Image (tube, rainbow, N blue to C red):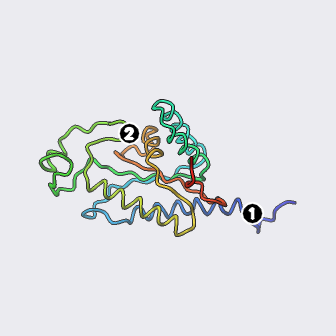
Amino acid sequence: MKMSPSLIESKNGEKEAVLETAKFMLIAARTAPKTSGIDDILTLIVYGEDKDRIADKMEKIAEERKIESFKRDAKNVRDSEAVVLVGVRGSRSIGLNCGSCGFKDCNEFEKAQKKLGKDFVGPTCLFKALDLGIALGSAAKTASLLNVDNRIMYRAGTAAMKLKMLSEATVAMGIPISAKGKNIYFDRR
């Protein structure tokens, strides 16, 4: 039977709704409270072949590091409709001179050489890391309010960083999203 243009099949409607939810997640991350009102949050929606590139990279990292959880999470990413990336420009200070970064003051932190560690660039301003956490929580909450399953994943962010998907970010996390009969992000082995 040919579908009428005035009918939307469940599969197509759900896919469109998940992608629309991803857009609302970007808004939630953008409008989340930021330290001193300074916005250094970066966001990106990744789906289709680019989403699968993240999963491929996660599988490669699993092999290189002999860490099975990268492979497990890669399957979740592959089975998701999209991944919302949320990152931060963590190498910028906010001028509080708190010292939690390990430097005497923000000026010393700003002058410090920024270098790539195993996954992210450091050192990172504590308050930028807090801003990232708040933005991630706001984005995940938004997906949950719209009944879209999600999970914040360090490993998806690591792969996206290595693929230079958020080129200005020093730290990034991924939030895969899906709408299935059962939440695919829990009861994982």
Q: Residue at x 17, y 56 (%)?
A: 95
Judging from the image, what secondary structure is the residue with disc 1 in? Answer: loop
Residue 163, relative to residue 9: is it above or below? above
Which residue is identified by label 1?
Answer: 9
Which is nearer the N-term, disc 1 or disc 2?
1
Quadrant (top left, top right, bottom left, bottom right) of the N terminus: bottom right
Which residue is identified by label 2?
Answer: 119
Observer-nearest residue: 73 or 45?
73
Quarter of the image where one finds residue 53 = top right
Please name the amino acid that badge 1 sits on: Glu
Q: Residue furthest right?
A: 1
Residue 77, relative to residue 10: is it above or below? above
Q: Would residue 107 appear left or right of 178 to someone viewing this image? A: left
Mark 2 burial class by Cα count in 10 Å: few <14, some 14-19, many 20+: some
- Which is in the foreground here, disc 1 or disc 2? 2
Q: Residue furthest left?
A: 104
Q: Residue at x 61, y 63 (%)?
A: 17
Please name the amino acid that badge 2 sits on: Asp
Q: Would residue 74 appear left or right of 99 to someone viewing this image? A: right
Judging from the image, what secondary structure is the residue with disc 2 in? Answer: loop
**How far apart in space, not on screen, are marks 1 and 2 (Cα)?**
41 Å
Where is residue 52? Give x, y as percent. 58, 42
Where is residue 182? Give x, y as percent. 64, 59
Where is residue 160? Give x, y as percent. 46, 43
Observer-nearest residue: 180 or 132?
180
Q: Residue furthest top?
A: 64
Q: Residue at x 60, y 54 (%)?
A: 184
